[in-house]
Structures are given as structure tokens and as C-alpha cells.
Image (spheres, grey):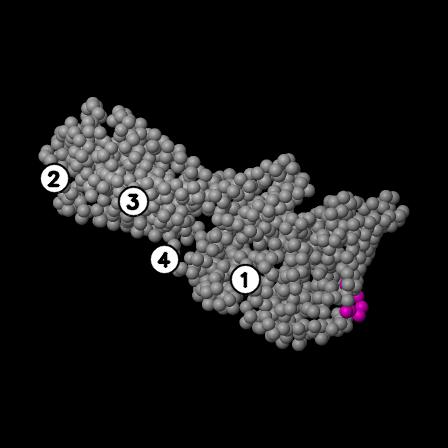
Amino acid sequence: MKRAAPWLWLLAVALVVLYLGLRLYSGITLQSNILALLPRAERDEPAQRIQDGIANSFSRRVVFLVGNSDPVKARGAGLMLASTLDHSGLVSKLTSKFDPDAQRKLGAAYFPFRAGLLSAADRADLLSNNGKAVVLRAQSILFGPGGFVNGKLMAHDPFFLLPSFFTSLPLPRSKLTPDGGVLSVRDGDTTYVLVSAELAGDPFSTSFQEHFHDFVDSTTQSMVRASPGTKLLRAGAVFYAREAAAEATGETSIIGSISIVGTLALVLLVFRGLRPILLGFLAIGTGVACAFAGTLLLFGELHTVALLFGVSLIGVSVDYSLQYFSEYFDPETTTPQDRLRRVAPGIAIGLITTLIGYLTLLLAPFPGLRQVAAFSVIGLIASVLTVLLWYPCLDKKDAPKLGRFFVDLANRHWVLWETPTLRLTRFAIMGACILLGVIGAFRLHMDDDVRHLQSLSPDLRQQEAEVQRLTGSPGGSQFLLVRATNEQKLLETEERLVDRLSVAQRQGALGDFQAVAQFVPSVARQMQNRALVLDRLNKPFLTAYLSEIGYGGVVDYAMPRRFLLPRDVPKTGPLSLLQLLDVGTADHPAHVVLLGGIARANVLQQISAGIPGVRFVNLTDDWSRLFATYRRYAIALLALSAVLMYPMLAWRYGWLPAIRVMLPSIAAASLAPPLAALAGVSFTFFNAMALVLVLSIGVDYSVFCRETWGSRKPVTMLAIALAALSTILSFGLLALSRVFAVHAFGTTMLIGIFLAFLFAPAAGDATAGTRRGVSL
Amino acid sequence: MLSMIVVRALERLSRRQIPLFWAVCLSVMVAVLPMAASAAEMAPRALMSGEMLKGRFIQDRQLAGFTKPLRSEGTFTLVPGQGLIWNGKTPFENTTVITGEGILQLVNGQEAMRLTAARVPGLGRFYEVLEAAVSGDTKSLAGAFTVKRIADAEHWSLLLTPLHGSEMAQLKSLLVKGGRMVDTIDVDKGGGDVDHISFLDQSIGPLALSADEKALLAKLHK
């Protein structure tokens, strides 16, 4: 069995490499949506699905404004972009064209049900029994200048209630005007033409992003060639996503390369031979390959953040190789088996405590972080298996002749912690750390704002702002979500809501709003309206009105049996907005009420709280709150992993010494955030997750210090110093990342690992001059 | 990202034509009335800023199904760059104010209808088109209308026929006639529906608005 193990491991690694090759060949999906790191809602499943749907439909929208100083050229370029988009297969719906027939279709859909459709003003007058006002309005339209009245309308809607309803519809404001078959807006000397579309693919899939990006680039070039001076403004999640993915991939290769090169240089400098490098590479390589394959197998895709963290795993998995190779410096170990036997207990305990740290990440309901955890756990186990099973076979018997320089250098760290006369220095260092920590604690502030957690390209941001300014459409992620058991109940709830929103609007709490019920009243409301029209308008006023104005025709004011339903409204054309507002599923009907110009969000919160089934949704705030919840969750995970590690350490070292082993890393984890705060780094969820790793890696160092004895101590310290350096090389470099989450993670790791290394010898057993048992 | 949803909605909603139609008819008058043609050239001259035009109007609106045209009479005041006040005296008191910002209608001093320019997409564009018409810039009009201009020594007329498929296709034709000033406008909406507006007792004078008139124009600002 013992002999077969290395071969079995070889077979397993070969299979992994084969699988990975196949997956890479067929193309893997890299996920870059930071919200994919977020948990699936645990409490309100339908609401979550609805919100996901909304976020999804938002993220699929792309808007272009094609600008040129010559309106004809702008129109030409816009039409060209539209038709190329249409033929590209990259978009499913194109909404740049202007359909002259849409208005007629809309009129035809509403016309039969006109008796039940009243504008808010007409309805209010009839409700207060003031039909006379409606009659006067009709007369002023008849006799006033211009206007829309014609003979046909007069015969079918003598009081012009339907036009009145149409003009009262709360349509969002637009600066865009129809112009020769397109929508355009003029800004200074430039005419912009709108082209908007819905993407046919997933905006967060890297392959789709690449296709789309290439397409937009080449189309822009040919547009500029065809009409020089054309400029293109763009807005859409896909542009941000592609930018983020490109940045993350670029950073992965840069940070990853520097990390590998730095680590290798370190190993080469200390061990002065190729063997440690090759064997180290082998351990890292098998680790990363297994981790990559395992994560893909488990999750089907890989998040770019998981990839970034995963690549940095190199810094951790190399620790075990370093432990092994540092034995070269110990003249007492002469065979590979000897070396392994000496470091195996430390590696095993270190691995288990580290795994406990990573496994707690698995408890977090964040899909992305589970990926990080899975990646790390699989990778570390594979690396350790390579060290344990292959190193004895592959390593040569005789160690290279190495000087004592590095060992002596490393030994100084022991000297600092174990020389009785340096007691004051130690206290001074600890005192300084605590003092700085206390000062930092006052500067420490929590930051859960999701807008800070996503780094958005300033150029794209500016283009989006331009698009918003030119189209006159407000940006915003606040709306009301209305839910009920069926569509009619939904509309009735919205009607109650609309009444209160109108009051709030008059009080200036919000600018405008759009609800489905304003465009399609509930059947109950339509029945009531019909009764109002019959009893309070037609019966008392119609005959007198007609004779007064001299109308001799026949009035046909039919009231069909059926009522207007949302499905009667044409899916294309002016009111396609309604489709977007309908966000429910067959089992869970739901509508969105759009809100514009919110001045007092608390008023909206009060209104929504007062009507059952209505919820005020503030996507930004919701996400921020979620990050806050999970920041606290991560702190709990930190405590939990400490608690889980303790029995294991207590079993090995005893109850009291186990506390001593844990103290250095606990100190590192608690001091890192306030010290980072001194450097202006706020505390986010990602910093908290980094602390989980600081704790488990820090415990590794303490365990290595505790496991060593006598003359081996300097050798062990050299290995720990190399480990800390390589970890800082990889994780510390993440502090340079422009991806905010990764930057936060990296900064905390940098400080935390340094502190863990600084305090690690305190866990050592100063009296341990003799050999401890090696069996495990 | 919510802006996407709104943009999408906007681009469709801006195609509404009912208020647009209001805009056509009203802006025809706003744009055409300032024409004060010089007798020698018979080419219209726009009102200068600092001037205003006052006069009487008679509007006969012929609609299918009515035994006789709907006649309204009253006065109007036009201030270039500010707007038009249309004051109906008979058959009942009503006031319509039209400015670049929208349209407001008052019956017995009560607000009966308000359309803001933001809610009437295209209003601005129609001003442009009709200004072009007035200055004889037939090139810009060619996109939307066929323009026919007839002028003799004392009178001129301008016949505007919307092109098929243009945004003004709901109108059949616009006929503007005048001499030194615009005398009549005929708006043919098809199906026998015709508005015939005559302008009488017109006078151009220095800008001097009453407090009431100022208040009316300001009402649309809020």
C-alpha cells in the first residue's frame, strides 16, 4: 500500500490534467459579476427570483448614442449600427426603429374599453359629483385653438374622456424626439441618435463579452470610416463587466507571474539549487491543477475573484515544500524519508488548521466564496499529498552543501523572542503594536456600500452619465415591488398605492412614478368608472351638451362585457414599458412601480410599509445591507474557526499551551484591521474574510514553531520566514489590485501575515530541547 | 441600471401622437402669426423682439356630424420668444396659453388642461419646422412636407402637405394666406374636418404686457 500510494496519486493527477485539458479545450466560463458572490436569499425566495429577474433584464440592456455634427450623418450611422447589430445575432431585441403604426395599434387596443378609462382629474370631478367640470373641459377642447378633435372621435367619445386619459398617463420624460424613423436628441452642435438593444447572451460570460466587444469595436471603426467625426456613447452592464473581467484576467497574469517569479527567486537564493524549485513547482502545479479541475467539476464555472484568490494559493501551498527543503540545512537529516518524518507532524497539523479556516468559508452562503474555499481546500490537499507521497521518491539522498547565513539570519527571530535580556524590547514591540492598534481602532470604520465594492471604469461611468443627460432619463435603483395572489388584486393594491404616491408627489417627496394600474385600471376600478360616466355624466349632461354644441350625429358609447386587461396592451410600441413593469412569474404575480426624482425616501418607506404586499426596494441599499450582514457573518466565522481549531491543538499540546499556540495568530487577526485603518483602509466584508485566512495561516506558523526543538529551531524559522515572505509576495501583491474586493483582501493579508510571523515564535516552547514524538 | 428600463420606455413613449397633434395645430399658429409681410416683396417678416402682436380671431371649426361649424371668437396676444395667449370670449370664456414649455387651458379661471413640453415630445421640433416654413427655407421642410408657395403683388399663400409616413401625416394640409399680415389659416384634418381661422384688427406694437398676461405666461413655468 505504501509503495502503491505515489503511483495512485500519479494516476489521479494524470486524470485531473486530462479533465482540465478537455475543459479548457471546450472553453470555460469565467464569471465576473460581483453579485454572483452574493448569497441566494435565504428568506424570501420568490422575491429574490423577481429581483434577480429585474437585475438580469437591466444587465442585458445596452444603449448607444451615435453622435455627429451633421444630423443626416448621425442618422445614417445610427441606422447602420442598428442594422449591423440586428444581423450580428448578438442582440435579441432591437429598439431603435420608430414604428408609425404603433400609435394606431395602441389606440385600437384601448378604444373599446374607453368607458372604463378615466383620467385622475375626470374621475375626481365625477366622484365629487362635478360632471359640469368635465363638460366644460370638453367644450373648451371643442372651441379652443388647435386640438385633436375630429368628427369620428366626437361620435364615439363625446366628452373626449379617452384622449384625456391618454394625456394623463404618467409617461417618463424624454428628450428624444422621433426624427426620420429614428429617435434623436440635439446637444449643442451634435445630433445623437439612439440605438438600444437587449443582448442575446449573458453579459457576464467572458466569451460573450469578447464577441460583443470585438463587434462594437469593428462597427465603430466602420462607422467612423463611413462618416468621419462620428462618436459613440455607450451604456450597459456588459461594458462594465467586460472591463472588469479584462482587468481581473490581466491582473491575474501579472500578480500571478510576479508571485511565482518572486517565490522562485526566493527559493533559488536560499537553497541555491534547481531541485527545490522543480519539486516546489510540482507541488504547486498539482495543487492548482487539482483545485481548478475540482472547482470546475463542482460549480461548472469559475468566478474571477475565486481565480484570483486561487492563484494566490501558490503562496500557501509552497509553505509545506519550504518546511521540507529547510531540512537541507539540518545536518542531522540525511535521507528524504528522514526530512519528511521530521516535518510531517507540523505539515499535518498546519494543513488541518488551515483547512478548518478554509472550510468555514464553505459555511458562508456565498457561491463565489464557496468556490474560493473549494479551490483552496482541494489545492492544499493535493499539494500536501505531492509533498508527502512524491518528495521521498524524487528527492536525492544527499542534501546540497548550504551555508549557515540564512539559518543564522532566521535564528535572530528566535533570539528576539527567547533571550531573557530582550524582554523589555519584546514588551516594547507588543506595546507599540497594541498602542497603534488602539489608535487605529478609533479610525476604523465599516464600509458596506456596494458602490465602493465594485470598481467601475471612470470612462464608462462618464459615458453612462452622458447618455442619461442626453436622453433625460434618470438613473436610479429604487422602486416599489408589489405582490399579490393574482393580477387583479395586484392592480387593486397598486391603485391604493397610486393614491398615496400622488399625495407624496404633491408634497414633493418624489418627482414621478409609473405603475401598471395607471395604464390599465383594475376591473373593479373600470366598473366603477363606467358607472360614474353613466350616472354622473351621460345621464345628466349628454343630451343638453349635444344640443348646445349643435351635434346632429349619433353617439355610440358602447360598453362591452369585457374589460381592459394588461394582456390587451400591445407588446410593442408606446406602452411596451408595461412588460418591463410586469416582473412576476405564473405562480407569483408581481409588478414594479418605477420611482423618479426621489427626494424623501423615508416617505416612500412609510407608504410601502402601510400597504400589505408593497415593498420599497433600494437595490444599492439592499446589497449594502447584505454586505454588512455578511461582514458580521465573517467575523462569526472567524471566531468559529478559532473554536474549531482549539480542540485539535489542545489534543496535541495540552489545554493551556494550545492557547499559547493560538495567541499569536489571534493577535495578528485582531490587530490587522486597526493597523490597516491607520493606512486609511476601511473594514469591509472582504477584509473580514481575509482575517479568516490570517488566523489559519498564522496558526500554521505557530504550530511549526511549537513542533520544532533544539538545534532544528533556526531551520524551522527559516522555513517560516520564507513561507511568510512568499505569502506576502502573493497575497500582499493583491493589495495592488484595482478590483476593490481583492485590494481589501490583499491589504489585510499583508498586515496580518506580517504580524502573524512577528508573533509566531511566542508560541514556541523555549524549554523544548529534546525531540518530541513524531508519530501522528 | 434602472436607467436602461427608462430609456427603453422613453424611446417608445415619445412616439405618442395625440398631444403631438395638439402641438402641430398650435405651433402652426405660433410660428405663422408673426409673419408680417412687406407689401413690396410679399415675403413674411418675423416680429422683432421687443414687439408684440395683438388682434381678434374668429375660428370656424367644421366637424363631421355637426349641423353648423363651431364658431369661437376672441382676442389673442403673441409675444415672440414668450408665447401666445388665446382668449376665447364666445361661446364661453376660456383661455389657452402656449409657450415653449407647454400648453395650458383655463375655463372660468380654473385649470382644465395642462400639457408640458416634456410631455409633448416633438413640440420643439415643430417650432423649428415651421420657423423654416416662415423664412421660406423649403429645404428643411422637404423632409416632412411638400411646400407650395404662390405670391402675387398683394397676396401670398403657402400650402403645406405632409409627406406620407412623416410625423405630421395625420394632417391633410395646411393653407396659410396673407397680405401684409397672415389673414387666414385653414387646417384640413381630413374626413371633412376643417378649422378655418381668420385674424382681424391685427396691430404690432411695443411690448407691454398687462399683469394678467404676464401671470398667464408665467403659469407654465412652474
Q: Given contact means CB atoms under 8 Å apart, are the residues at marks 1 and 3 in contact?
A: no
Give the magenta-colored segment's residue range: B65-72
Residue A327 among magenta residues: no
Q: Which of marks 1 and 4 is nearer the N terminus?
A: 4
Q: Is residue A570 visible?
A: yes
User: Which comes before the other along the chain, label 1 or label 2?
Assistant: 1
Label 1, on which residue? A516
Question: Residue drawn 28% across and 48% down?
Answer: A359
Residue for point 66% across, 71% down: A132
The mark lying in front, picked from 4 and 3, is 3
Mark 1 residue type: Val
Of residues A267 and A128, the one nearer the viewer is A267
Q: How many marks?
A: 4
Give me the chain letter of mark 2: A
Give the residue pinned by disc 3: A377
- Do the residues at discs 1 and 2 belong to one chain? yes
Q: Residue B5: x and y, percent?
A: 54, 53
Q: Is residue A712 left or right of residue A633?
A: left
Q: Residue A42 carries which label?
A: 4
Vertical side of A776 occupied by A534: above or below: below
Front-lying residue, A242 or A113? A242
Proximity of marks 1 and 4: CB atoms separated by less than 8 Å: no
